[in-house]
Image (tube, rainbow, N blue to C red):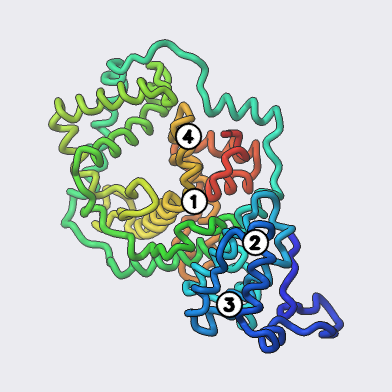
Amino acid sequence: MSLVKTKRDVVPAGPGSITGAEPGLDDLLAQQGTEQAFRSLEAELRGEVAEEYPSRWIDVADYDPADQRWIVHGLDLLVRNAAAAGPGFDGLRASSLLVDLARDRRFDPGISDRRFMYEVLTLSGWLETALPAALSAPTAPALTRLAEIYRAPASDPFDPAALTSAVLPALTDRLAEQRTWWVAEPVEMEDLTWIERTARSIQAFVRDDTGLFTGACAEGPLNDGFTFDGSVIGAGARPGDDTTRMEFLRRQVHLIGRDPSYGSALDATGYDHTRVDHRGALDDLLLTWLAGDTGLSGLVGEMLGHTPAHRSGPTGWIYIPALLPSSEWGPQEAWRPYLYRAMLHELLHRLAHPGYVEKVDMVSDPQILEEGIVDLLTTEFLELSRIHPELGALVPEDVSVGYGTSGRAAIEIQDLVGPDNVKAAFFLGRTEFIGLA
């Protein structure tokens, strides 16, 4: 992807010099004034619709000179690169986004030129259209296989009662085992300052060092003022209401119910997540379990406080275990690497584009999109962070995708369409690039 820099940005790629035959943008600003330069560039970027909407100068006029300079240089950069943005680039939206987001900028022209350039291309929505424009849709053979992954073949009618004997005992045993990790020895708290500091480092790393797709959504969390360290809280603060308990139990049932070692019980009993009646019947069954099995209900309530989680939607708390487990869990030196991976995984959940999240219920195994793809990206970013000065020491020697069959399906999806197609779907909501129109 080649970019045309603004005149004041042009730097020789090799030996030689820039002649400066034309005045730079700063010279033009000095000659014409900020208002005239802004209005001219804004109109050019807006194109044919320019006269249909009032100029945003009425807002920009109240900005300080540094904000105004950032906006004008940004508009100039966009005007020169609008044709490279691909179909769907909206000059009207782009110019307004620069005005709205100028005060949250991190880089200034002439000081951090390359970072300024990509900041403008991100905050204007340029990258949102330019990155997918360079991708190819899945081929016909790939689409055939993707359809098989996403939508299981027709099966016998769903038999919820069969899950009680196939899943409930194994689920109870698993939760009981996990409970012992926190009751065998005196409870200690993790250093909350370490958690907050690590959260800040993770957000900065994900935003700046994992490629262009991650933060390319102009109005996504990484660009709208979201702070990971301000959103992380100990899992012990997680509410124990019926909705939360159901979310937890549903996730556990999907994990065990897809596991071949437990007979792939969800498939064996005919469950199809794409069917609303099947989802309703499963929830009714889980409510019956919680109401009728006090042992299970107690285990669910206890494990809520020790399990990483995030509140559904674009906002809300992200819960991280803050109590140290006993030696029954494993070696103490592995705990913080586990927390790092869990925090990275949960941050990625928050970065999932709403258009991607909407497709979860279109897949017969929702865990493929809900967890498998997230863990696939988690492992990729973990590997990238090995050279990070702070996070690198927290990366385990062996990093692999979890979530059983759902994780393996995510790997196959990436093999079929390519890593960038997966990122375009996940971070930008362009799910057609993974075969989900």
Q: Which is closer to the viewer, label 1 or label 2?
A: 2
Which residue position holds label 2? 46
**Amino acid type of the residue that numbered disc 1 sits on in the rendered structure:** Thr
Going from N to C along the chain, the mark reached first, 1 or 3, is 3
**CA gap, disc 1 to disc 2?**
38 Å
Q: CA distance from mark 3 to mark 2?
A: 18 Å
| Residue 212: % across, % down | 61, 59
Between discs 3 and 2, the one toward the N terminus: 2
Residue holding disc 4 = 406
- Indicate the secondary structure of the residue bearing disc 4: helix
Please give the residue where the numbered disc 1 appears in the rendered image: 378
Do residues under tags 4 and 2 come within 8 Å of each other at their CB atoms? no
Disc number at residue 70? 3
Between 106 and 297, the residue placed more toward the observer is 106
Q: CA distance from mark 1 to mark 3?
A: 34 Å
Q: Is residue 147 above or below residue 160?
A: below
Q: Quadrant of residue 65?
A: bottom right
Instruction: Please indicate whether residue 219 sits to the left or right of residue 8 in the image.
Output: left
Instruction: Confirm whether residue 349 shows in the render.
Output: yes
Amino acid at the residue labelled 2: Arg
Which residue corresponds to the image point at 14% horizontal and 25% vertical from the top-left? 292
Query: CB under 8 Å between callouts 4 and 3?
Result: no
